[in-house]
Image (tube, helix red, strand yellow):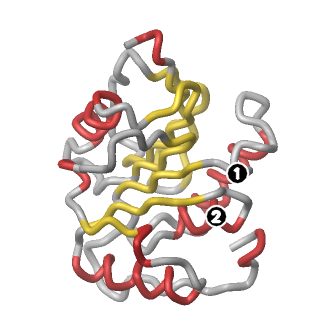
Amino acid sequence: MGGKFRGKKLLTFSHEGTRPTSDRTRETIFNILLHNPAFGPKILIDKEILDIFAGTGALGLEALSRGARSVTFVENEREALSLLYENVKSLHLLPSCVQAQDARHISLPLGSAFDLIFLDPPYGKGFILPCLTRIAENGWLADGAVVVIEMGKEETLILPPFLELVVERVSGAAKVLFCIYNIRLL
């Protein structure tokens, strides 16, 4: 990790079947967020982050390490959740930032609006659009929020009308979409 948690090692999965974001893809994501003019160098500073299908929390913890105000993690897979709690604990964060929920049926407090959302579901399962729709319908996106979607590089996605694609990158087996939310397009 970079930022204030530089050098900290996160616990990772020990089994096949779960696909954490690779270090290379995570580095690509943060380089684009921090250096693309559409997002700018202050994209993370003092922002509210939502990490959906969080796994071990690597993306959200990286954002927190680089200046985000807070991160809410959503995960329900047993081993991932256990590792996520351990990673949060090792960085002396409150466990209340972890929501042990099925991300497809996410339920967050009303009034929660996030500036940056990481959405990294299992590839090829069709979870992206239902999650995006639920997030938008419940007002969990601040106007101008950035949504980073990780999917299999062979997958296709027709974005909902409230998201504008800004950058698309392929990194290894992943395709990463960087979108901006525009409430006026709903």
The mark lying in front, picked from 1 and 2, is 1
Please say whether residue 90 is visible from this viewpoint.
Answer: yes
Of helix, strand and loop, which one carries label 1? Answer: loop
Residue beneath label 2, please? 64
Residue located beneath label 1 in the image: 46
Can residue 156 be seen in the rendering of this structure? no
- Residue 123 at x, y = what percent? 29, 52
Residue 44: percent from the left, percent from the top? 69, 49
State which quarter of the image contains the N terminus. bottom right
Q: What residue lies at 55% left-to-right and 33% top-to-bottom?
A: 145
In-front residue for pair 78/94: 94
Residue at left 33%, top 48%?
A: 109
Front in this rendered view, residue 102 or 35: 102
Picture quadrant where residue 169 is located? top right
- Residue type marked 2: Leu
Which quadrant holds residue 6?
Answer: bottom right
Mark 2: few, some, or many residues within 10 Å (few <14, many ≥20)? many
User: In the rendered view, does 68 fall on the left or right side of 168?
Assistant: right
Badge count: 2
Disc 2, SS: helix
The mark that comes first in sequence, 1 or 2, is 1
Q: Is residue 159 above or below residue 138?
A: above
Q: Is residue 158 above or below residue 35?
A: above
Pick whichever, 182 or 161, lies toward us: 182
Look at the image and tell me in which quarter the C terminus lies.
top left
Residue located 36% across and 88% down the image: 14
Amino acid type at mark 1: Asp
